[in-house]
Amino acid sequence: MSEFTLEAVVCKSCGSGLSVEVNDNIVYCTSCGNGFEEIDSEMKSIEINFANAAFRSEGELIYKPFWLLNTSITILERKATGNFIKNLFGGSGEFTGGDILFYIPAFYCKIESMEDLSKQFTLKNPVASPQKYNSKLTGFAYGKEDAAKLAEFILISLEAEKSDVIKSFRYEMKINSYSILGIPFYDNKNGMLKDSVLGIDILED
Ligand SMILES: [Zn+2]
């Protein structure tokens, strides 16, 4: 029979006790608003902010973590058949690019929900001024590498949706920075969660 001990985790900045779940490698200090990511058993600082709920709904408001990936994209080549010649950046040329802020769920959810949340949040970029909240933020399941892979998948699928048939698409994605954004969801206790920014329903896992 295995035993496990729950270590007391203390904030490196202010000394407050931190609320962590067993698998969390990222913690948010509700006392001082600093975030930490465990990398090679060291606690490194990471920026953590929260989004405001944009509307009221039934259910308890809980926060789920997202990665925010600030990226610069360069489109090296893009060939498609069909009427849509504009790409994500609105240009009609084959060679263009721009900056995209990707919103990628860091919490565990079904792949369909993850894709839906990532695409809609990334396209709408609805959180203009994230803030520090005194809110619990736990349930981190995916790390930076996972988030970067999903961002590439989202880029390709958004681009592919814009044309009838995409024949070639080559790009470079440079990730300028990573941070964490807590997005509020309404948990109405019937197995569904509704995010309170865009109103997307997902299955609770
Ligand atoms: Zn602290």
Image (cartoon, rainbow, N blue to C red):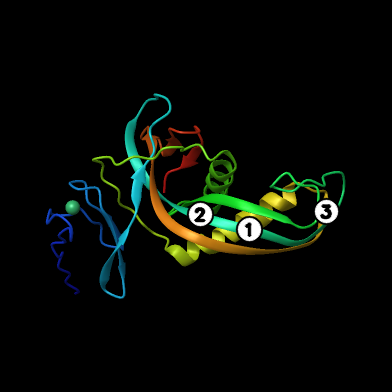
Q: Amino acid at mark 2?
A: Asn
Structural distance between the alpha carbons of marks 1 and 2:
10 Å
Which numbered disc covers residue 165?
A: 3
Mark 1 surroundings within 10 Å by alpha-carbon count, few (fewer than 14), some (14 through 19), many (20 or more): some
* Towards the viewer: 119 or 49: 49
Q: Mark 1 or 3, which is nearer the eye?
A: 1
x and y percentages locating residue 35 in the rendered image? 28, 55
Foreground residue among 104 and 68: 68
Q: Answer with left or right where residue 124 lies relative to residue 135.
A: right
- Give how far apart the Cα atoms at labels 2 and 3 are: 28 Å
> Please, what secondary structure does the residue beneath circle 1 have?
strand
Residue 24 visible: no
Asked if residue 27 shows in the view, the reply is yes
Q: Which mark is residue 70?
A: 2
**In the figure, 112 relative to 167: above or below?**
above
Sequence-wise, the earlier of marks 1 and 3 is: 1
Q: Is residue 164 left or right of residue 127?
A: right
Q: Is residue 128 left or right of residue 166?
A: left
- Do residues under tags 2 and 3 come within 8 Å of each other at their CB atoms? no
Task: Say whether disc 2 or disc 3 marks the residue closer to the N-terminus.
Answer: 2
105 vs 159, nearest the viewer: 159
Q: Residue at horizontal 42%, vertical 63%? A: 143
Q: Which residue is mark 1?
A: 73
Point out residue 133 in the picture as x, y percentages from the top left corner.
27, 40
Q: Position of residue 174 (x, y in %)?
A: 57, 63
Picture quadrant where residue 21 is located: bottom left
State the residue at coordinates (64%, 52%): 98
- Amino acid on which the number 3 mark rests in the picture: Val
Residue 62 position, x and y percent, is 33, 39
Which secondary structure, mark 2? strand
Taking the spot 14% from the left edge, 65% from the top edge, the residue there is 7
